[in-house]
Structure formats: structure tokens, C-alpha cells
Image (cartoon, rainbow, N blue to C red):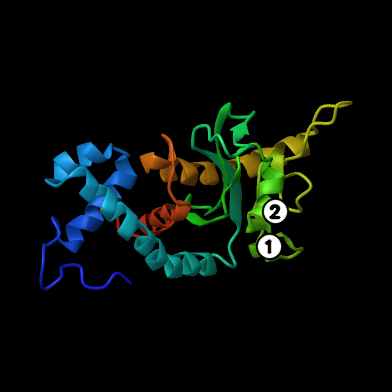
Amino acid sequence: MIGPWQQPRGRRRALGLYMAVVVVLFYLRRNNSQAVEAELFGCSQPTVSRYLTILEPVIGRCLESLEAEAAADRAHSTLIVDGFLVPTGERAHTKGLFSGKRHACGVNVQAVADLRGHLVDFGEPMLGSMHDARAFTESGIAKRYAAHAEPGGPGLIGDKGYVGCGIITPVKKPDYRPLTAAEGWFNRQINRRRSAGERAIAHAVNWKILDTGYRRPLRLLGLEIYRRQGFNPFE
């Protein structure tokens, strides 16, 4: 993928491969400035920048098989889908990033979680102004989990923003009457299960780069799937 990290001749890299990967992961986890990273790890800011450019795509490719495995393991389990905004700031040449719901510019990411609150999958990032129902379809999540929404399927749960998408959602209150006792009970059961999806997103945005302004490929969500599978280098 990247060839020999340390060449047998010529100038050696400032850090070994293991520590270079740690630098990249620490940057994604904490979103410190590259200058601060350089101070912490005893190298220069351009070195940190180079390691991010070289290693982040490699880490993303290494996680692809794990992401597929996690999705396959939950193929027969009830899942939750929810969208969240990854802030990007304003971009002069990109329209439609502003989310009126969240009052910020960013991309809409559709996340799929299991009932334990573990992230399972995520869709392609959509414009922040896009409604969750449309993002659900266009991000590829609707197609990948169509079997969950079929009659007799394991079930796919979403909030009221997904009404009309063919998945399980709370009952909307009609204008002309209050919810019945049965409808209220049903909504409570759905919302209790949906809380696991919100918990999975809360864990995902502990990768501070997703919460404080993101400008890199979104493959790092695979790191959260990896972390929740058992091995966690930060705990």
C-alpha cells in the first residue's frame, strides 16, 4: 500500500510507522492543530501534514473489510437509522451546506446502529440542507438495508423525519385529535430503542474532528466501528 516506511538509504522519516499511525489517530480523535501535534510527538508540522496525507487513506482502506463484517453480523438484527450534521464551515464553491434545522453548515451523514448503541454502518455524506428522508435514500442506506424494512424483516427504526420511507417510525399526532393510549405506548417503545442510535452518534462525535469542523474524507467513521468491536487504544 505504502511500500517500505523507512528507506534503506537516504534520510529517515522522523517517526516509525507505529508512531506515525498514532499521530494520525490522535489528530482525528482530538482535532488539535498540526503544530500542537508536532510539539507533542517531537516532529515538525509539515511532517504531521505528510503523515495525514499518506496514512489516512490507507487506514480507511484497512477498515473497509471490518465495516462490511460489522454490517453482515447485524443482517438479522433490528437496526436504527439517524442522521447527524458534520460541521464543515462555509464553502464558497459548494451550495446547500447550511442546515436550517441545526443552524450550521456541514454534511448530513446517515448512521446505522444496533440496539446496543454500536455504530454498524454509515452512508455517503449528503449536503447539510438535505432532509433526512431524502439523505436516507440518496446516501445508499435505504438500498443496503431494504430487506430490514420488508414485511417480516428484522426491522429498521427511525424518527419522524423518516415517515414515508417504509421503515418503523413513531406515530405523528393528527391535527384533529390527540394520540390514543395505544399510539402513545407505541411511540414510547420506539423512542426507547431509538436512544441507542443517538448514543452511537454521541460516541462517534467523540472523534472531535467530526464535531468541531471537518475537512477530510469521512472514512474515519470506520474507526468508531473498529473501536466498538472491542479494541480501543484510547481507553
Residue in view at x 15 percent, y 39 percent: 39
Q: From this view, report whether residue 11 is shown above or below residue 187.
A: below
> Looking at the picture, how far across and down is residue 169, in whole percent?
71, 45
Report helix, strand or loop for mark 1. helix
Q: Nearer the viewer, residue 104 or 215?
A: 215
Residue count near mark 1 (Cα–Cα under 10 Å), binned few <14, some 14–19, many ≥20: few
Q: From this view, report whether residue 126 is shown above or below residue 175.
A: below
User: Dividing the picture into quarters, in which one does residue 230 lie?
Assistant: bottom left
Residue type highlighted by circle 1: Lys
Residue 101 horizontal side relative to residue 4, left or right: right
Residue 162 horizontal side relative to residue 32, left or right: right
Q: CA distance from mark 2 to mark 1?
A: 7 Å
The reply to whether dot 2 and dot 1 touch (C-beta < 8 Å) is: yes
Residue in view at x 33 percent, y 55 percent: 53
Residue in view at x 43 percent, y 48 percent: 216
Q: Which numbered dot is residue 137?
A: 2
> Looking at the picture, how far across and down is residue 227, in whole percent?
35, 55
User: Dividing the picture into quarters, in which one does residue 32 lie?
Assistant: top left
Residue count near mark 2 (Cα–Cα under 10 Å), binned few <14, some 14–19, many ≥20: some
Residue type highlighted by circle 2: Thr
Q: Which numbered dot is residue 199?
A: none
Q: Which residue is mark 1?
A: 143
Q: Nearer the viewer, residue 136 or 87?
A: 87
Residue in view at x 29 percent, y 69 percent: 2
Q: Nearer the viewer, residue 235 or 184?
A: 235
